[in-house]
Image (spheres, rainbow, N blue to C red):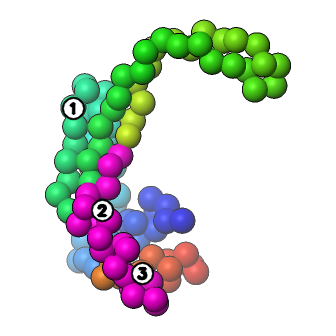
Amino acid sequence: MTTRSDLIRALHQRHPRLPMRDLDNLVASVFSTIIECLENGERVELRGFGVFFSVARKERIGRNPRTGAQVALPPCRVPMFRLSGALHKRLNDADADGALGVSRDLVSSNRAR
């Protein structure tokens, strides 16, 4: 699993001239923008990566798994992500070594720290 900190460290290794604080702010800004768009019911499309969107669920009746009793579930919005075709192909066409064209060394070396 890659954490936000791992992502920031990997970005810092690729762009050593940028301070970690700036990279942290950049990552936070990207995530907060995606969240704001989802809150406003907008889609966020990142070409070659995928699409973030939210789906409205209607009120429905569910069951408590422990007791089996029926429970009224209120309407809600659920965040969703759909992988792009290009990334799906890239992941599934990776060779047996798991090379994705993405520098896995950067992420895995950060975990060792």
Which residue is under mark 1?
42
Please report the residue visible at 27 percent of the width from the left and 54 percent of the height from the top. 50
The magenta stretch is: 81-100
Callout 3 touching callout 2 (CB < 8 Å):
no
Would you place residue 68 above or below residue 108 in this image?
above
How many angstroms separate mark 1 from mark 3 (CA)?
Answer: 32 Å
Q: Quadrant of residue 11?
A: bottom left
Asked whether residue 87 is drawn in magenta, I would say: yes
- Kind of residue sitting beneath label 3: Arg
Please report the residue visible at 69 percent of the width from the left and 19 percent of the height from the top. 63
Query: Residue 64: percent from the left, percent from the top?
Result: 73, 20
- Kind of residue sitting beneath label 1: Glu
Extreme residue in the right direction: 67
- Kind of residue sitting beneath label 2: Leu
The quadrant the C terminus occupies is: bottom right
SS of the residue at dot 1? loop
SS of the residue at dot 2? helix
Of the residues under marks 1 and 2, which one precedes in the sequence? 2
Of the residues under marks 1 and 3, which one precedes in the sequence? 1
Residue 104: numbered disc: 3
Of the residues under marks 3 and 2, which one precedes in the sequence? 2
Crowd band around label 1 with a 10 angstrom C-alpha radius: few (<14), some (14–19), many (20+): some
Residue 106: numbered disc: none
Residue 23: numbered disc: 2
Query: Residue 111: percent from the left, percent from the top?
Result: 55, 75
Extreme residue in the left direction: 47
